Each structure stands twice: as structure tokens, then as C-alpha cells.
């Protein structure tokens, strides 16, 4: 009895106990007070998100009853408007929006139940399965790719930002001026080229990029890297009698790079712009001048002062970067033929009008973003004394 | 203005103490700093050229981009090159050749009588493949000379009827054309519509959609940011909580949902798209709104705000006349930086078939065509809009970068 009660309300108790723990610690530590504050704020934002998403789904045409009846219709039964209305009452769709939203959110907070997808006629949790984690992995892969390129090159670009193309310093000898000019020119050219390449990722629409890459494979006569596995490996298990299947792993990697590359490249441009702007902002601060005056120069000056401080806001924006990358994923998923939650989202919104599924996926994305923001906030407050001072007073 | 320009230009090291520098307004300083950036200057010229081409598309395009101007004798035709010289000699006036379609050699009689064997022969001869349909005979002896400032199809150069003034200036003047027939600089599509003219017309539609979205965005962020920052307290908390919630939801699925909903309402496709542009703008208030709020939170305790309040200015007036203008330069820069992202949102929607659709010329529609395997293999010239699109977005991003640097007041002495 109690077991089943706990089993059907486990998420609620989990959330409550985390809150309770934080509350208990917050009485002795100011820092945990801040964490508790953030935790409650995150939950509140989630509640708001769920309300927005839920009311947004109201604008999609059709509802659950119509879909169910339409399904029955294909089974050979004749349907009247009265049947649809009766079905609506049975499903509780005649109740006001707030009522339905409240019951949805209660199910969600009590046991993590995301509702029932009418178009798929199965629970959303089952329909999603591990597909959301698949999208999650793609996004993280794309983000890592973008960061790996954008952070070093953005710093370099910021370093080059106000450098002249030529050295006109009259105190240098003409040979040195020439040498400096050549060196500056090379650096400026590299900076420009890197920026052009990274902005190309933004300017080339994702779907076109993915299509072009697939097309190159077609023209080369190779099998295209669409989907997640090739036909040969799709139904093979990861483990068989002879142990782990490395062939399947190879095949997986040969397919998975394409979506990661495409969304990563398009995310690079914005990241590069951000890093560049952040580092330039920090470079103009007085403490950098002070360090210069103390004789710090070269790489030590850059790495130790402006770059180090500009990493924090970047880390802080990981959540929103994830949102931006996920934003691009659906279209890439459609082109490449992935079967992750992003392509499910497109299917639910544009084809089957599956409100429940779409709402659930959007909510999950928001959940990930909010959790990431929560984690980065509390981590930053823990490791950065400046942030700690500003938030703890 | 020129003195300020000189300050940053050649004479910059000489008179840094020039008075005009200290009395110059924020915009003048940004402009002067912007002019020092080579990449930004080049990009802005490219951008202005593209925009002008788009704005006066009808004047620059030799062929009517709609189905009325479709060239039924030159469907799926390759770009017609413009030459100054060839084997037959040099000509000061540029010319192009005459292109004629070879009649397909389909022997219908043999097909009627011969049965399967004749059909096999026909298919293997290649007369039916789509790549063969693009074949045109080039007649090098029949030159068609380009004419400048010619009269051709009629268009309205300036139409003020949509804004209520009964004025329309219709003209037939075009920059160039040819003597006989039409010239297709970038080839034609499967209906015979001129790709060059379509692309030029598409630029302005895309830009105007982005403009609508950005103006709406500006207003929504000004209202949210202004109200939230000025009043602070509880209103601020509520508004910021909503902003935070809107910010974490990925926007393209939301636009999609709105597009699907709007598809039920009976609108023309252009009207529907402008409605989507409004939605895009309305939902995009989070970033700019928050920046504005922070700015106003710090500004509202300044003396000039107090002075305005003591003079009896209403809250609304203080926000709009005193607080927001102090932030204009940032707003303008931010708007320009956001341009490419709004354009990209349009193309994404068009790709999914929920934005504008075929008869309308927008870059998204033309880009969507590029995913057709037939076009990728047989009509590469239809990638011309892709090139224009990429160039335009790149130009926007580079101008945005240079502007961002120029708007940073600390960037001077480095």
C-alpha cells in the first residue's frame, strides 16, 4: 500500500527532500541559502515554462478526442459529432485549460509522467524512451565541438581586434618594421580567415550543409552517413558471444559525426562572437593595465588576466547555448534521418499535431536548460569569490 | 563630422585633444570608429549593394520574375553568358548568343508500333532523362546585343497605396535587356522563370520580413525592459520570471506551432508570413529586454531622471523620452547584429514548408528548392540564391562585428 503510494509519487518526494536538505543546510550556511533560493527559482521557472508550453499547444488544431475517434474511424466505425463530444467529456477535454494544466503538472511532479500521446496512442514516456538522451548527446557533442573551436580562436581574434595591419612605429628600425608588418599581416589574415570560416557555418543554412555533405557522398559513390547505423549493423547487439562489437562502434562514429559537425559548426559563429566580445571587454579593464605596469606581458598577461575572467560568463551561458543548439537540431534531424526527439518534435508539430508529445519535449529541453543554469550558477558562486560576494552580499 | 573622421584617420596621432572629439555625440563616435575597420567597411559596402539590388529589384532585373515572365522557350535553361568578344570578333557592346531548343527525337510512330523494344531504345538513348532536357543549341553567329535603360515589362517603382496615399509610379524602364527575347543571366528554373530576377526580388521580401520582426522585437523588449527596469520591485520580479521562462524554450519549435496555427486561418501566404514575423518579433524580447532593464536600473537614480520627475513628467515620458534614448546606440547595434538570425529563422520555416511557399519569391523559398536532387544534379545554377544568401548573411555578421567593436567606448586607445 505505502510502497505503491511511494512508487506513484516518487518524484515529488525527491524534489521535496532536496529542498528540505537545502533548507536545513541553509540555516547554518549563507551559501546554501543562495542554493535554496536558486532551487526554488528554478522550480518556479519550470512551472511557468510548463504553463507557457501547455497553453501554446492549445493553438495546434485538433485534440485528443478527435484523434482517437479518427483512429476508430479507420477501423470501420461510423462516427458522429456526438461521439466526439462524448469522447471529449470522457477524456476531460471539456474542462478549462487551467484545470487540464493543473492535472498535467500534478502527474508530472508526482511521478514524472509526461502524459499520454494521442497520435501515437502510447504514453509519452514510452514514446520518447531514450530518444531524448540521444538528442541530448548530439547537442552536447555539437557544443563541445563549437567550444573547442570558438574559445581559442575567439581569444585569438580578440587579441587581434585593434591591431593595425602594418607597423608604423618610427622608433623601430626599418628592418624591424618590415618584419613586424609581415608578422602582423599573417596574424590578421589568419584572424580574418578563421572568422570567415566560422561565420560560414552560420550563413550556410544547416539543412543545406547537411544536404551538401550527403550529396558529396552520393557523388563519390560511398554509402551516405544518414541515420545512426548502416543497415549492416542496425540490428546487431552491442555485445555478442565474442565480446564487445567494435565494428558497431566504428559504424556509429562514422554516422554520428555528421549531425554533430553540422550543428557544431553553426553554433561556432555565435560562440566565437561571444568569446571575442567577452575577452575584449575584459581587456579594456584597469586591472589589465595594472598587470602590464607590473611587467606581466605576452601569453602570461592574456591567459592570467582577461581570458581567465572572461571564461566565467561563458560557463554561465552553457544552458542557453544548449537551447540554441537544440533549436537547430530538428531541421538537421529531418535531413539526416535521425530518429531522436528533435525529429519527433517536428513530426508532432508539423505533421501529426501531437500536442502532448510536443509539449513534453519542449518541457524537457527547458528542464535541461534550467538545470544547467542552476548548476552553473551554484558552481560559479562556489568557485568565484567575486560572484559569491555579489550574490551573498 | 569630418574633423572627427580625421581624428581617427590619418591625422589621428597629431591632435587627440581636438575639441570636436570631446563634444561629439555617441553616434558620431561609433561612426568614426566603424570607419576605421577595413573588414567592416568592405562588408558594409557589399551589404548596401545587395540591399539596393533588392530594393530596386524590378529595375535591375531584365525579366518579370512571376509566371507571367516565364520563358516557355527556355525552360531549365543554363545561364546565358554575356561576352565582349569571341572568335567572330570584338564588340564594345556586350552580347549573348541565341539559344534554341532542339526538338526531342522521339519517334512516336516506332513507339506505337514497336512495343517494348522501341521503348527500351528510347529510354536508353537518353532523350527522356532530365539532364537532357537542359540541352540547348547555341547559335554563335546570331548575337543578341545587350541594351541599357530599355523599356520592358511594367512594374510599379513606387507604390504608396498600402500606406494610404493614393500614389503609384508605374514605369517600364529597366537597367538592361536584349534585343530579341529575354536574357537569363543565371539561367531559368523548371517553369522558365528567370533565376536572377527571382533572386533579386526575393532579397527584399526576406529583408522586409526581418525588418518587421525586428521592429516588433524592439517594441516588445522596450516595453518589457523599460517597465521592468523603471518600476522595479514586484513588477520587475514578475516580468523577469516570465522573461526567464520564455528564454529557455527553444524558439523554432514555438514558431512552428504558431505557423501551424496560422495555417488554419484563411490568409494569403504573404499575410501569413508577416503574421509569423510578428510572432518571431514578439517572442524574442528576452535578451534585449534584460539588457535594457539592467541599463535602466542603473540609470533611473541619476539626477536627470529626478529632475524630470520633479518637473512633473509622467512615468511613461521619463521612460521613453529620457531613459531609452540614452541607450539608442546599443539598441541599434543589437538590432543589426540580430538581423542574420531573424533571416535564418525565416529560411528554417520555409524549409519545413511552413513559411512562404512557392509562387512567392523569398530567399527561404528559393533555398528550399536547392534540396531537390534534380536541381542539385542538373540545374546547378539554381544555387545562385544560396550564394547571394550566404554573402548577405556574412556581410551582416561582419558589419555587426565591426559595429559591436565600434560601439564599445573603451576600444579607442588600444
Image (cartoon, rainbow, N blue to C red):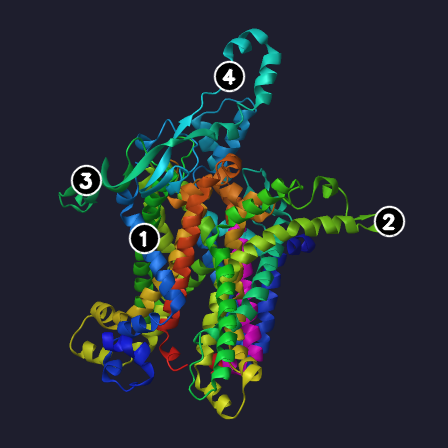
What residue is shown with label 4?
A: B106
Residue B141 lies left or right of residue A336; in this view the side is left
Q: CA distance from mark 3 to mark 4?
A: 44 Å
Whether pointer 4 and pointer 1 mark residues with C-beta atoms closer than 8 Å, the reply is no
- Mark 3 vs mark 4, foreground winner is 4
- Asked which quadrant contains residue B263, the reply is top left
Lower position in the chain sequence, tag 3 or tag 1: 1
Residue A336 lies left or right of residue A97; in this view the side is right
Q: Position of residue B110 (x, y in %)?
A: 55, 10
Mark 3 nearby-residue class (10 Å; few <14, some 14–19, many ≥20): some
Q: CA distance from mark 1 to mark 2?
A: 64 Å
Mark 1 nearby-residue class (10 Å; few <14, some 14–19, many ≥20): some
Q: CA distance from mark 3 to mark 2?
A: 79 Å
- Tell me the chain of label 3: B
What residue is shown with label 1?
A: B51
* Residue B97 or residue A90, whichever sits in front: B97
What residue is shown with label 2?
A: A242
Mark 2 nearby-residue class (10 Å; few <14, some 14–19, many ≥20): few
Residue A95 lies left or right of residue B170; in this view the side is right
* Disc ID at residue B155: none
Q: Position of residue B407 (x, y in %)?
A: 35, 72
Q: Residue at x 54, y 28 (%)?
A: A72
Q: Is residue B155 above or below residue A291?
A: above
Q: CA distance from mark 2 to mark 4?
A: 60 Å
The N terminus of chain B lies in which quarter of the figure?
A: bottom left
Find the magenta span and give its range: A360-389
Could you tell me which secondary element the residue under label 2 belongs to? loop
* Residue A171 or residue A309, whichever sits in front: A171
Q: Is residue A144 above or below residue B261?
A: below
What residue is shown with label 3?
A: B171
Amino acid at each position: 500500500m505505502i510502497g505503491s503510494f511511494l512508487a506513484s509519487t516518487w518524484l515529488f518526494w525527491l524534489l521535496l527532500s532536496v529542498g528540505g536538505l537545502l533548507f536545513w543546510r541553509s540555516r547554518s550556511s549563507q551559501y546554501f541559502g543562495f542554493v535554496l533560493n536558486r532551487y526554488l527559482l528554478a522550480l518556479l521557472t519550470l512551472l511557468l515554462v510548463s504553463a507557457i508550453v501547455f497553453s501554446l499547444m492549445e493553438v495546434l488544431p485538433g485534440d485528443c478526442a478527435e484523434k482517437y475517434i479518427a483512429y476508430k474511424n479507420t477501423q470501420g466505425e461510423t462516427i458522429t459529432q456526438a461521439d466526439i463530444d462524448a469522447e471529449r467529456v470522457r477524456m476531460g477535454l471539456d474542462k478549462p485549460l487551467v484545470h487540464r494544466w493543473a492535472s498535467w503538472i500534478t502527474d508530472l511532479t508526482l511521478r514524472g509522467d509526461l502524459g499520454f500521446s494521442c497520435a501515437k496512442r502510447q504514453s509519452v514516456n514510452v514514446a520518447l524512451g531514450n530518444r531524448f538522451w540521444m538528442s541530448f548527446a548530439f547537442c552536447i557533442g555539437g557544443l563541445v565541438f563549437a567550444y573547442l573551436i570558438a574559445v581559442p580562436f575567439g581569444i585569438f581574434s580578440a587579441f587581434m581586434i585593434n591591431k593595425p595591419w602594418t607597423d608604423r612605429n618610427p622608433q623601430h628600425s626599418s628592418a624591424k618594421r618590415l618584419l613586424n608588418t609581415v608578422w602582423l599581416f599573417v596574424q590578421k589574415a589568419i584572424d580574418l580567415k578563421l572568422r570567415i570560416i566560422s561565420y560560414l557555418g552560420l550563413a550556410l543554412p544547416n539543412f543545406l550543409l547537411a544536404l551538401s555533405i550527403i550529396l558529396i557522398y552520393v557523388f563519390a559513390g560511398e554509402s551516405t552517413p544518414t541515420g545512426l547505423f548502416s543497415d549492416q549493423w542496425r540490428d546487431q547487439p552491442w555485445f555478442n558471444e565474442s565480446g564487445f562489437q567494435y565494428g558497431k562502434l566504428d559504424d556509429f562514429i562514422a554516422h554520428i559525426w555528421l549531425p554533430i559537425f553540422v550543428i557544431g559548426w553553426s553554433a561556432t559563429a555565435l560562440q566565437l562572437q561571444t568569446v571575442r566580445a567577452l575577452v575584449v571587454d575584459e581587456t579594456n579593464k584597469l586591472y589589465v593595465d595594472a598587470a602590464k605596469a607590473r611587467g606581466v606581458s605576452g601569453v602570461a598577461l592574456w591567459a592570467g588576466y582577461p581570458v581567465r575572467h572572461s571564461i566565467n560568463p561563458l560557463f554561465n551561458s552553457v544552458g542557453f547555448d544548449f537551447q540554441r543548439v537544440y533549436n537547430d537540431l530538428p531541421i538537421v534531424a529531418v535531413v539526416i534521418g535521425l530518429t531522436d526527439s528533435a525529429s519527433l518534435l517536428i513530426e508532432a508539430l508539423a505533421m501529426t499535431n501531437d500536442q502532448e508529445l510536443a509539449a513534453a519535449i519542449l518541457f524537457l529541453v527547458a528542464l535541461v536548460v534550467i538545470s544547467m543554469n542552476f548548476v552553473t550558477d551554484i558552481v560559479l558562486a562556489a568557485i568565484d569569490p567575486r560572484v559569491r560576494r555579489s550574490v551573498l552580499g | 563630422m569630418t574633423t572627427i573622421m580625421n581624428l581617427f584617420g590619418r591625422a589621428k596621432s597629431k591632435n587627440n585633444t581636438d575639441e570636436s572629439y570631446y563634444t561629439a555625440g555617441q553616434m558620431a563616435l561609433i561612426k568614426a570608429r566603424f570607419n576605421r575597420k577595413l573588414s567592416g567597411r568592405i562588408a558594409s559596402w557589399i551589404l548596401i549593394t545587395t540591399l539596393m539590388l533588392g530594393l530596386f529589384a524590378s529595375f535591375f532585373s531584365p525579366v518579370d520574375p512571376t509566371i507571367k515572365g516565364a520563358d516557355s522557350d527556355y525552360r531549365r535553361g543554363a545561364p546565358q553568358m554575356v561576352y565582349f568578344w569571341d572568335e567572330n570578333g570584338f564588340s564594345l557592346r556586350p552580347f549573348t548568343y541565341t539559344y534554341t531548343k532542339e526538338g526531342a527525337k522521339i519517334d512516336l510512330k516506332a513507339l506505337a508500333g514497336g512495343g517494348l523494344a522501341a521503348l527500351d531504345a528510347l529510354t536508353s538513348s537518353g532523350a527522356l532523362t532530365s539532364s537532357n532536357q537542359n540541352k540547348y543549341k547555341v547559335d554563335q553567329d546570331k548575337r543578341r546585343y545587350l541594351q541599357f535603360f530599355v523599356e520592358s515589362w511594367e512594374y510599379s517603382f513606387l507604390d504608396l497605396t498600402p500606406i494610404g496615399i493614393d500614389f503609384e509610379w508605374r514605369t517600364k524602364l529597366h537597367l538592361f535587356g536584349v534585343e530579341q527575347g529575354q536574357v537569363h543571366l543565371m539561367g531559368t528554373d523548371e517553369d522558365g522563370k528567370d533565376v536572377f530576377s527571382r533572386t533579386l526580388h526575393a532579397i527584399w521580401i526576406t529583408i522586409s520580413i526581418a525588418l518587421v520582426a525586428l521592429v516588433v522585437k524592439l517594441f516588445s523588449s522596450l516595453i518589457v525592459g523599460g517597465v521592468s527596469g523603471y518600476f522595479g520591485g514586484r513588477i520587475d520580479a514578475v516580468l523577469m520570471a516570465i522573461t526567464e521562462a520564455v528564454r529557455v524554450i527553444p524558439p523554432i519549435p514555438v514558431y512552428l506551432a504558431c505557423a501551424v496555427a496560422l495555417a488554419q486561418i484563411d490568409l494569403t501566404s504573404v499575410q501569413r508570413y508577416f503574421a509569423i514575423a510578428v510572432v518571431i518579433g514578439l517572442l524574442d524580447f528576452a535578451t534585449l529586454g534584460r539588457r535594457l532593464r539592467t541599463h535602466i536600473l542603473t540609470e533611473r537614480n541619476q539626477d536627470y531622471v529626478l529632475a524630470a520627475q520633479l518637473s512633473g513628467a509622467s512615468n511613461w515620458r521619463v521612460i521613453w523620452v529620457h531613459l531609452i534614448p540614452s541607450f539608442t546606440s546599443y539598441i541599434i547595434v543589437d538590432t543589426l547584429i540580430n538581423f542574420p538570425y531573424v533571416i535564418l529563422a525565416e529560411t528554417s520555416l520555409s524549409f519545413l514548408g511552413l513559411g512562404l511557399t512557392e509562387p512567392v519569391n523569398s530567399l527561404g523559398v528559393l533555398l528550399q528548392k536547392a534540396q531537390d536532387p534534380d536541381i542539385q544534379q542538373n540545374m546547378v545554377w539554381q544555387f545562385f540564391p544560396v550564394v547571394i544568401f550566404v554573402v548577405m548573411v556574412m556581410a551582416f555578421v561582419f558589419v555587426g562585428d565591426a559595429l559591436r567593436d565600434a560601439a564599445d567606448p573603451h576600444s579607442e586607445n588600444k
